[in-house]
Image (cartoon, grey):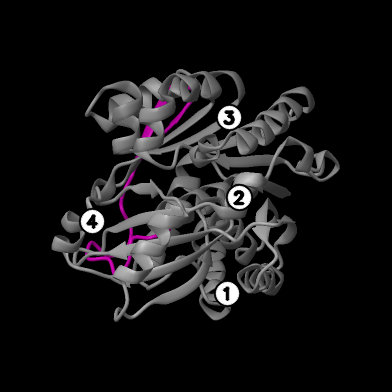
Amino acid sequence: MRIYGIGNPLIDIQAMIREEDLSMLGLHKGTMHLIDRERHAFLVDYLKGHDLHYSPGGSCPNTMVTLRAMGIETTLAGGVGHDSLADTYRKELAKVGVHDELISYDESTGTSLILLTEDRERTMNTYLGANRCFNADDVNLDSLAKASIFYFTGYMWDTEAQKGAVKKALAYCKEHSIRVAFDIADPFAVGRYRQTFLSLIEEYCDIVFANSEEARFLFDNYDAYECCRSMGKLCHVAVVKNGRKGSYVCENGRIVQVPLQGSTNPVDTTGAGDTYAAGFLYGVAKGCDMATSGQIASYLAGQVISQLGTQFSAAKAKELREHVEKTYLG
């Protein structure tokens, strides 16, 4: 099985800051803020003197990399620049074995300034850069045709070009019976595109991921269980992640609760949702039922929040793969 993703390849730049810094910068904790070149330069200057950690990232890319590390074939499409950051990004994809369908443009590679507070919550400030250039003409339908699942996130709706690319892929998937998995990804994205997302879910999506806040924005309901039920009426499989309370998975109207696995005192929550999606899709790819897929997802998410960074080392990925195969597939 191969999973094809269209996403935002970004270089993550992580820094530890104080709660007061978020207030001074006017940032809403735990969300993603789209920024322009000037704001990016201002934040980089603000962080001078901080210990900065650089790594390849981006929501959909994190999911594709983790899936590949777990042994599932993946393809990543998106936009990068003609610069050293793009070279670094491509090398990392090649190292883990993700099929690289990145397009290079005369624009800088995107970055995400990830600010971590003492509670290990992350607040992202994303400069899309070359990602904004990826468009419908760049979608390789021959490659998509080889996939069993197409995966994308709500972040793609923030530019017209990327939106056009995803719509082209969705139309192709519908025509050729390729399953579609959609991660809503950010509550502010729901605020911008709520009705569009509801229509997308109902018309195109087989598997949908949301956290409790995203689901609340989507269905105007604070009850994660009821949100999962509502979303489950629109698609085949609905997943609502509910923080320390675990997650709910609804398949054809039947809801199961998946308990939280891993630490309740995380080191870094960046990429937890991306890793959850990877674990769930891994279970689907291996033919697991939805409850088991949710358990694998919860396990991997619990592991990634216990480390700094969004991706596992090769040694750690091997250890996790062996544990999952023994515990959930044996």
Q: Nearer the viewer, mark 3 or mark 1?
A: 3
Number of marks in the rendered image: 4
Which amino acid type is shown beneath numbered disc 1? Answer: Lys
Q: Report, in whole angstroms, how far the alpha carbon at label 3 lies from the one at label 1.
A: 29 Å
Label 3 crowd bin: few (<14), some (14–19), many (20+), radius 10 Å: many
Label 4 crowd bin: few (<14), some (14–19), many (20+), radius 10 Å: few
Tell me if 255 is positioned left or right of 314 in this view: left
**Location of residue 87 by image quarter:** bottom right
Q: Nearer the viewer, mark 4 or mark 1?
A: 4
Q: Residue at x 77, y 23 (%)?
A: 175
Give SS at disc 4. Answer: helix
- Residue hosting label 1: 318
How far from the left and from the top, in percent, is residue 141?
82, 39
Q: Residue 131, which numbered label?
A: 2
Q: Residue at x 72, y 41 (%)?
A: 148
- Residue hosting label 4: 25
How far from the left and from the top, in percent, is residue 218?
36, 25
For marks 4 and 3 on the same chain, the one whose residue lies earlier in the sequence: 4
Give SS at disc 2. Answer: helix
- Residue hosting label 3: 206
On whether residue 250 falls in the magenta region, the answer is yes
Q: Residue 61, which numbered label?
A: none
Which amino acid type is shown beneath numbered disc 2? Answer: Asn
